[in-house]
Amino acid sequence: MLSLLFLVAAALPQTAPQGATAPADPVIADWRAVPDDELLVMTLANGKQVVIRLAAAMAPAHVGNIRTLARKRWWDAASVYRVQENWVAQWGDATEKKPLPAGVTDRPAAEFEIANFSPAVRMAQADGYSTASGITADGWPVATNGTQAWLTHCYGMVGVARDALPSTGSGAELFTPIGQSARRLDRNYTVVGRIVEGMQYLSALPRSEAAMGMYATPGERVPIAKVRLASDLPAGERPHFQYRSADNPRFAAAVARRENPEAPTVSLGGATVCDVLPAVRRTP
Amino acid sequence: MLSLLFLVAAALPQTAPQGATAPADPVIADWRAVPDDELLVMTLANGKQVVIRLAAAMAPAHVGNIRTLARKRWWDAASVYRVQENWVAQWGDATEKKPLPAGVTDRPAAEFEIANFSPAVRMAQADGYSTASGITADGWPVATNGTQAWLTHCYGMVGVARDALPSTGSGAELFTPIGQSARRLDRNYTVVGRIVEGMQYLSALPRSEAAMGMYATPGERVPIAKVRLASDLPAGERPHFQYRSADNPRFAAAVARRENPEAPTVSLGGATVCDVLPAVRRTP
């Protein structure tokens, strides 16, 4: 059939893509568990689930807020209230006026950047938004300008919406890029995680033509039934996920293969970090 | 409200973005008409229209095929039969077996590349997929490796699906990236245009979980009522579009502003070509 051989999906698949050589395939040891308290499960009123892996070590203050918000059930009856074409889907309190619960710090110190740039695999080429980038051992996309380091706003990453600086937000209002990667938000917004399952329940929502893609009427909003940390769910409902680690030669080979595909496919010998996010899967 | 001030849309808007200075605003002379025979109007069975600007000068053989396919009404009763999360939406003949009409050249000479790299505005930074890129006077995103030049697979650009090389396809099966830009397809597929209206009617379609995102059942497919060149539509139904030209200091200033946003927003002093596609609008 037309296009099947070459139009393979954008993220590195769990199994070897076309023309892969065996050494690049992940082995059991490459898969590592995502801690249950670093997994946020958002259940929409329609029953669909969006699962977010939290970057707990990268943005501890905002992830701390998010854990508290989930435990206080702050998002129950919240909604996805903004879906802007080729930009973002955003959820939380549509009125953006609901008081934050005790224990949540509004406008904590900025976490727009991370402590250091130490990827396990580096991309071969720079991009328009950083001088170097790569994937950390535990699977996060990071970039640097040679001085600061940060998590990148790839498609499906989760950022903290905020008002004008110096506001840093709180974590109560979250967004994810649903079009081209939103790299120009790097270092300007806090990245708190990555959607690892159910992205299509946000990316395929109807776009709003209203200002900033805010749904113009309450009826357009997509109700959220509940948001919980996996660790707070009953054992029977608790999902378990694994990420493909990057600190091994198999992942490095997979990235190199993406940067230098086999002939007759041509390339510059590069790819962007958003195009090599490691696979995440439910624990078999 | 949270996030309104900074989370502005990804494409350069027709009106000045936040903090714009007057000289960067387009003036009447910057808007140029898209010829009616370079505008393809795809009407879905649900009545929604997707309007594609054709890159007639960049891929003449494939655009020639597309014009013939439209005039022969080849796509009438075709469908959008593939929607793969964070990858592409693809349309045409779902069986991929329907014979091409007379006058359509199957597998014409490859048009993966264009004659030369001559943008009106160059991006300040290289990216992972090209050593230089920019926007041509007539608004097309182009890139180069220093030797070859090509149109880039940005979100919303339209490419020609094909079988394994040496197949070049025909133009009968088309796709558009609906997630992160699909730049790794650059120089491997023929780009024939850009969706300038109605992208949301493709990008928000339900994703398929089946192999390659092909809809598993005919019932999932999104029927296409008809596809016509605007020039072949009755005057009363014919849309007219204008694109914002790039060969003027106002567009150059808008790109520079996107690469170097006003403080307190920080940047590397760069952006990617897919993030500065010129606005296209219905003729006022």
Image (cartoon, coloured by chain):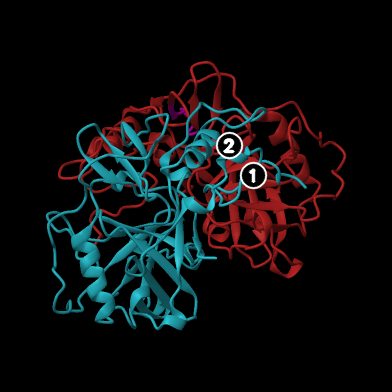
Chain colours: A red, B cyan
| Percent position of residue B23, x then y | 58, 39
| Percent position of residue B130, x then y | 31, 35
Q: Residue furthest front?
A: B29
**Amino acid found under the numbered disc labelled 2:** Leu
Is B200 contained in the magenta span?
A: no
For the point 13% across and 79% down, which residue is it? B102
| Percent position of residue A273, x then y | 42, 35
For the point 21% across and 47% down, which residue is it? B113
Q: Judge by depth and name the residue closer to the eye, A92 or A104.
A: A92
Distance (Cα) linking label 2 and label 1: 8 Å
Q: Are marks 2 and 1 in contact (CB under 8 Å)?
A: yes
Q: Which residue is mark 2?
A: A185
Disc assigned to residue B7? 1
Q: Secondary structure at mark 2?
A: helix
Q: Secondary structure at mark 1?
A: loop
**Amino acid found under the numbered disc labelled 1:** Leu
